Image (spheres, helix red, strand yellow):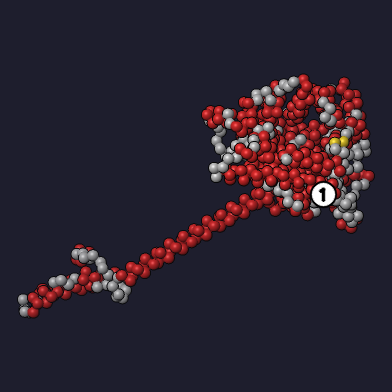
């Protein structure tokens, strides 16, 4: 049942990729739904067996083994994780027919294959030995589950905004598998990837270089060669980049179009005059080498073919190595030193292009942007004549012999803003407000000149995406949400083969990458908003609790005061002030002296003295409050 369900999933996926229409998706969703029902049935069976085991029953008759358990874990977890990365409209359609898309549950289930706990401390020597001897290692897909978890942390999270990133957890899993399989090409590749995402490019190149496999599997090492090429381009090491690109072109058949283009641009960037004819020869072979995969042309090959044709027409390409690194999302893994080198190189090109900008276009640099900075859509569609306030290019606005000047101008400013943004928010470094301001200005420049782009519209859409990330990092969630929703709305609705010509939403360059990134960013933004709302509710609850405790204390204090008043004698309040009390004491003393002078002449004096010997101001005060008995004369 498990193998049958996995085969159904593979067949359905290939069919959808081949036909690329709504009806094939609807047709194959039935097969996918059947496979999901099998996975859910197996999970329910496991739950019932566990209940039977807890009740003391014998479960040997069920013939469960680690191969079946790890297979169900792998399939069910990836089912949830993969669907969660799809665009919103696809997720809603799949949820309508009963498909799950719980990424957190899928990641947690994937960890159960090896009993990994992301929040636990690293294993001690004894625990590590117990893990090695555990029966959990017997499953056929045990290591596949570990590879999937590491790849999500180190590869998928490098291309898309991702919340569940824990490089140290991925390193723990990888080190365990490297201990068991020290020469494994897969786990050595992931170890090098871990060094790369931690901006240790030299270490990553050295690990890739140490990978060795049997001659029959030589093509597997081409993935490591490609990673070395990317690291060399990030470090602007043109000699190493030329060596690796030519090795891929000579040995690999994965994509001749991409490898010819990479060999051409690395040779071009090295700048040896004697290699100029070689660059032209390679560029001429780029487009004829395009292939289809499952009946579909992949966007990196389309991108390379378009750039090669531009070079053949104009004999120029603007920063082709940095431009290609955008596809690989390499700027997020660049060391700070490499980012500063890239910033310097891009600034030189931007200054050169600013000097070439026609004087008639200077006014656009200071012109106000429309609401939301949406400038391209204002010039497209049937209704553009009535709603567009964008300047139309004249002959004076164009450069002779430079047909794609505004494409290059926008790409240069986009690359400048991208590098400045990564420097401003570089991890473990203080926030750089100047770089953030430079990034914002560069992206707004792209927005202003984007209506004049002919091919490279991805610079405009990626600028909106990165502006959304800046706003999200600064806590402006509503503004960031508007950016991401706008990007998600640029999808070409081809459900019934109808183009959105009225709305002006034609297909843009690298549309798939833009939509995937915008969807992942929206998922991240909603999580941030949920956490912020939870913290706000918690803060309001704490304030309410403090107010309630304060109210209870006040009520208790008033109750105690009332009780004391009830227990005291029921008399009127103290009638005299301190000054009056002093006068009373003085009068009493004078009266006693006068009585002593007439003691000898009055017989009743002794009776009065005996009657008043116990009288004092203390007794007077005692009638009003229970003050302690004191010596009045000394007090006075």
In this orientation, which residue lies closer to the viewer: 397 or 267?
267
> Where does the C terminus fall, quadrant-wise?
bottom left
In this orientation, which residue lies closer to the viewer: 565 or 75?
75
Q: Position of residue 156 (x, y in %)?
A: 71, 38
Residue 438 visible from this viewpoint: no
- Label 1: few (<14), some or many (≥20) within 10 Å? few
Q: Circle 1 sits on which residue?
A: 26
In this rendering, is residue 564 above or below 489? Answer: below
**Residue under the image location 72 percent in, 39 percent down:** 2
Q: Position of residue 1 (x, y in %)?
A: 73, 40
Q: How many marks?
A: 1
In this rendering, is residue 241 above or below 148? Answer: above
Choose top left, top right, bottom left or bottom right for residue 135.
Answer: top right
271 displayed left or right of 539: right
In this rendering, is residue 452 above or below 170? Answer: below
Choose top left, top right, bottom left or bottom right for residue 436.
Answer: top right
**Residue under the image location 78 percent in, 54 percent down:** 371
Q: Position of residue 579 (x, y in %)?
A: 28, 70
**Residue under the image location 58 percent in, 52 percent down:** 535
186 displayed left or right of 373: left
Q: Position of residue 189 (x, y in %)?
A: 70, 28
Choose top left, top right, bottom left or bottom right for residue 351.
Answer: top right
In this orientation, which residue lies closer to the viewer: 109 or 425?
109
Residue 155 visible from this viewpoint: yes
Secondary element at tag 1: helix
620 displayed left or right of 33: left
In this rendering, is residue 597 above or below 114? Answer: below
**Residue under the image location 13 percent in, 75 percent down:** 611
């Amino acid at each position: 049942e498990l193998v049958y369900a996995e085969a159904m999933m593979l067949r359905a996926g290939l069919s959808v990729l081949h036909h690329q229409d709504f009806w094939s998706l609807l047709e194959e969703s039935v097969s996918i739904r059947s496979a999901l029902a099998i996975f859910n049935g197996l999970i329910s069976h496991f739950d019932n067996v566990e209940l039977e085991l807890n009740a003391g029953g014998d479960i040997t008759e069920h013939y469960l083994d680690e191969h079946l358990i790890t297979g169900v874990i792998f399939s069910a977890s990836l089912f949830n994780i993969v669907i969660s990365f799809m665009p919103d409209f696809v997720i809603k359609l799949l949820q309508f027919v009963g498909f799950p898309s719980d990424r957190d549950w899928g990641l947690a289930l994937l960890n159960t294959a090896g009993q990994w706990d992301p929040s636990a401390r690293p294993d001690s020597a004894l625990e590590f030995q117990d893990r090695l001897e555990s029966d959990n290692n017997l499953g056929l897909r045990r290591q596949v589950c570990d590879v999937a978890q590491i790849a999500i942390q180190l590869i998928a999270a490098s291309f898309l905004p991702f919340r569940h990133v824990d490089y140290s957890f991925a390193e723990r899993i990888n080190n365990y598998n490297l201990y068991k399989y020290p020469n494994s090409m897969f786990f050595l590749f992931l170890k090098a990837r871990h060094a790369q995402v931690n901006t240790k490019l030299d270490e990553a190149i050295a690990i890739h270089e140490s990978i060795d496999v049997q001659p029959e599997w030589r093509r597997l090492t081409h993935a490591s060669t490609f990673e070395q090429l990317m690291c060399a381009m990030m470090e602007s090491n043109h000699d190493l980049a030329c060596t690796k690109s030519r090795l891929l072109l000579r040995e690999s058949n994965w994509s001749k179009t991409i490898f010819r283009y990479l060999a051409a641009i690395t040779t071009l960037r090295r700048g040896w005059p004697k290699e100029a004819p070689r660059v032209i020869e390679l560029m001429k072979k780029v487009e004829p080498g395009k292939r289809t995969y499952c009946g579909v042309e992949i966007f990196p090959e389309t991108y390379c073919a378009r750039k090669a044709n531009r070079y053949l027409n104009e004999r120029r390409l603007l920063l082709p190595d940095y431009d290609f690194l955008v596809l690989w999302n390499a700027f997020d893994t660049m060391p700070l030193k490499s980012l500063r080198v890239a910033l310097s190189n891009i600034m030189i090109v931007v200054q050169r292009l600013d000097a070439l900008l026609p004087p008639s276009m200077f006014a656009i640099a200071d012109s106000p942007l429309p609401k939301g900075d949406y400038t391209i859509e204002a010039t497209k569609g049937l209704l553009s004549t009535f709603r567009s306030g964008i300047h139309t290019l004249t002959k004076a606005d164009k450069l002779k012999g430079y047909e794609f000047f505004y494409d290059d101008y926008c790409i240069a400013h986009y690359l400048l803003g991208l590098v400045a943004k990564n420097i401003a928010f570089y991890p473990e470094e203080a926030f750089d407000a100047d770089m953030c301001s430079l990034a914002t200005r560069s992206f707004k420049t792209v927005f202003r000149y984007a209506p004049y782009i002919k091919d490279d519209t991805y610079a405009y859409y990626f600028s909106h995406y990165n502006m959304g990330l800046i706003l999200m990092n600064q806590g402006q969630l509503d503004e960031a949400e508007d950016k991401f929703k706008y990007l998600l709305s640029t999808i070409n609705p081809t459900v019934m083969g109808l183009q959105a010509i009225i709305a002006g939403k034609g297909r843009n360059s690298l549309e798939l990458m833009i939509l995937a990134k915008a969807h992942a960013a929206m998922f991240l933004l909603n999580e941030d908003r949920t956490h912020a709302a939870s913290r706000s509710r918690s803060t309001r609850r704490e304030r309410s609790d403090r107010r309630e405790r304060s109210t209870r204390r006040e009520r208790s204090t008033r109750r105690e005061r009332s009780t004391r008043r009830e227990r005291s004698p029921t008399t009127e309040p103290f009638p005299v002030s301190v000054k009056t009390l002093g006068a009373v004491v003085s009068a009493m003393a004078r009266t006693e002296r006068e009585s002593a002078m007439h003691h000898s002449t009055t017989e009743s004096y002794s009776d009065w003295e005996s009657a008043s010997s116990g009288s004092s101001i203390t007794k007077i005060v005692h009638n009003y409050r229970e003050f302690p008995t004191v010596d009045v004369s000394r007090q006075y």
